[in-house]
Image (cartoon, rainbow, N blue to C red):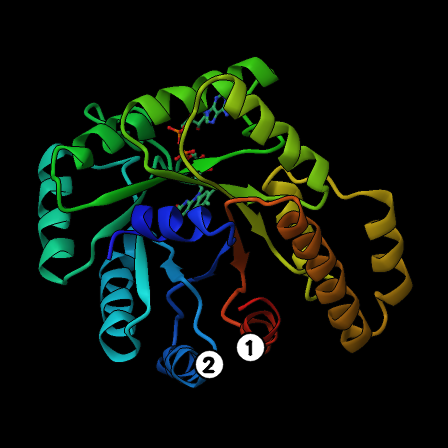
Amino acid sequence: MKISEIYEQKNKRNQTVISLEIFPPKTLNGEKTIFDTVTNLTKKPDYISVTYRDVTGDKTREIASKIKQTTGVEVLHHLTCVQKSQGDIDEILNQIKEANIQNILALHGDYPKNQENYSTSDEYPLAKHLISDIKKRACFSVGAAAYPEGHVDSNSISENIDHLRQKYEAGTDFFISQLFFDNDKFYRLNEAAKTARIACPLAAGIMPIMSAANIERLIFFGASIPTNLIKIINKYKESPEDLRKAGLEYAFKQVDDLIAHGVDGVHLYTMNRPSVANEAMERYL
Ligand code: FAD
């Protein structure tokens, strides 16, 4: 099923679409954990997205396809274009279609770090070029990335919205936001998108803080950390289990508030953790 239809059906009934994000694990044990978790969920998410890296591209397809086949849960295949030619993308899209996957999150991808003389794509300088290319194939529903606090390279709020509008006009069916810890930032983006006549669903990306090691990565994503969350982190930083509990509680408070505000979707960055997936599904579905 196309994810655009899932948003349409649930939003018509004033329900929030609840989705999970996972990444291809490095080990077979990690893969087993994912399949055991998804199979054993008593309440299933509306869809599961699987992240993409050039080095793990085939794994993204294999894991997404297996989840769909074995559990019936709909899947979203992330795809980046930063270093790809049109020929590469054609081949990957054919493989995704053959694997019976109908949904793609079309992304630019980050420029490679610590790699001299890399060449970026002439055909896909931005995600919007990938979006319009995928949309030429009627078999796919296409999602794209949105940034409640602006992309780290964005200079202003108006540039941020202009960028979003260009992706919408290229054919985006739904957006998923970068993670954030202050819901007001998301509500502001939602309002600005409506004013700019961006008329497709926008899902809120939420990541529970599970350990002190998480925090440096979050700053890399451009997410600001509100004072009340800094206090929680400082209070529990010497006690991993208490920090995990407090981080999850903070994230669930954010989700409760988002649902109460009637957002189109909540996308949980569960970081392959079965306990988070289970607790979230029990609470929200
Ligand atoms: P584009 O929208 O095309 O942006 C490309 C370039 O345009 C940026 O590098 C920047 O220079 C500029 N730009 C971007 N946004 C703005 C803005 N708002 N205002 C002004 N200029 C802007 N990366 C992966 O490698 N694999 C994944 O699986 C993956 N999944 C993601 C899922 C989500 C929900 C999100 C939010 C991001 C994900 N990313 C992933 C990260 C993403 O690839 C990077 O953030 C990347 O830098 C920009 O990708 P884009 O698709 O937003 O590209």
Q: Residues within 10 Å of mark 1 (few under 14, many from 20)?
A: some
Hey, which quadrant is residue 185 in on the image? top right
- Picture layout, residue 76 above or below residue 40: above
Give how far across and how far down residue 231 sits, in percent.
89, 53
**Numbered badge on residue 75:** none
Q: Nearer the viewer, residue 271 or 136?
A: 136
- How crowded pointer 2 is (Cα within 10 Å; few <14, some 14-19, many 20+) is rated as some
| Residue sitting nearer the eye, 199 or 145 | 199
Which residue appears at 61% of the width and 56% of the height? 207
Callout 1: CB less than 8 Å from ligand 1 = no
Camera-nearest residue between 77 and 75: 75
Along the line of sight, the residue nearer the viewer: 133 or 175:
175
Name the residue at 74% across, 63% down. Answer: 247
Question: Label 2, on which residue?
Answer: 41
Please state which amino acid type lies under the numbered disc 2: Leu
Question: Seen in the image, is 125 located left or right of residue 275?
Answer: left
Q: CA distance from mark 2 to mark 1?
A: 6 Å
Is 58 drawn above or below residue 182 in the view shown?
A: below
Q: Which is more N-terminal, label 1 or label 2?
A: 2
Residue 243: quarter of image: bottom right
Give the image quadrant in which the ligand numbered 1 is located.
Answer: top left
Q: Which mark is residue 278?
A: 1
Are the two marked residues, 2 and 1, in contact with CB atoms closer than 8 angstroms? yes
Question: What amino acid does circle 1 point to?
Answer: Asn
Please give left or right for residue 261 compared with residue 78 in the image.
right
